Image (tube, rainbow, N blue to C red):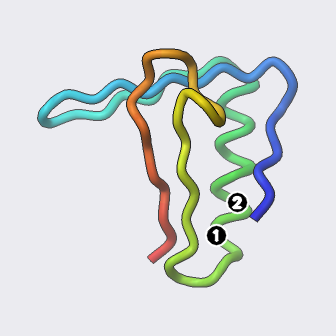
Amino acid sequence: MKLDWVDGFKISVQSTEDEVTISANKEGLLSLAKQLTELATEEAGSHYHLDEHSALEEGSSNIVIEKI
């Protein structure tokens, strides 16, 4: 599955014991919408990993999004 990002996107993920916060600019939200739309068309079990080395801002928590 190819991840397609909108130019200028910024996304960060912060987590605590009971909450996850995803913060993004307009381009980041549009990018996430594109990724979720693509994932929705994939088979169950398809997933992608996001971290500060692949898409998220420095200091972000890692996140896995999976289709069930």
Mark 2 lies on a secondary structure that is helix
Q: Quadrant of residue 32?
A: top right
Residue 58 position, x and y percent, is: 52, 16
Residue identified by numbered label 1:
40
Mark 1 lies on a secondary structure that is helix
Tell whether label 2 touches label 1 (CB within 8 Å).
yes
Q: CA distance from mark 1 to mark 2?
A: 5 Å
Note whether 15 is above or below 3 in the view shown. Answer: above
Q: Which mark is residue 37?
A: 2
Q: Residues within 10 Å of mark 2 (few under 14, many from 20)?
A: few
Note whether 18 is above or below 10 in the view shown. Answer: below
User: Left or right of 23: which side holds 11?
Assistant: right
User: Residue reaching furthest right?
Assistant: 7
Q: Quadrant of residue 37?
A: bottom right
**34 and 43: which one is in front?**
43
User: Left or right of 68: which side holds 30?
Assistant: right
Amino acid at dot 1: Ala
Amino acid at dot 2: Thr
Note whether 43 is above or below 12 in the view shown. Answer: below
Q: Residue at x 62, y 83 (%)?
A: 43
**39 and 1: which one is in front?**
1
User: Residue reaching furthest bottom?
Assistant: 43
Point out the image quarter for the C terminus: bottom left
Q: Residue at x 50, y 78 (%)?
A: 45
Point out the image quarter for the N terminus: bottom right
Q: Residue at x 68, y 28 (%)?
A: 28
Residue 19 position, x and y percent, is: 22, 34
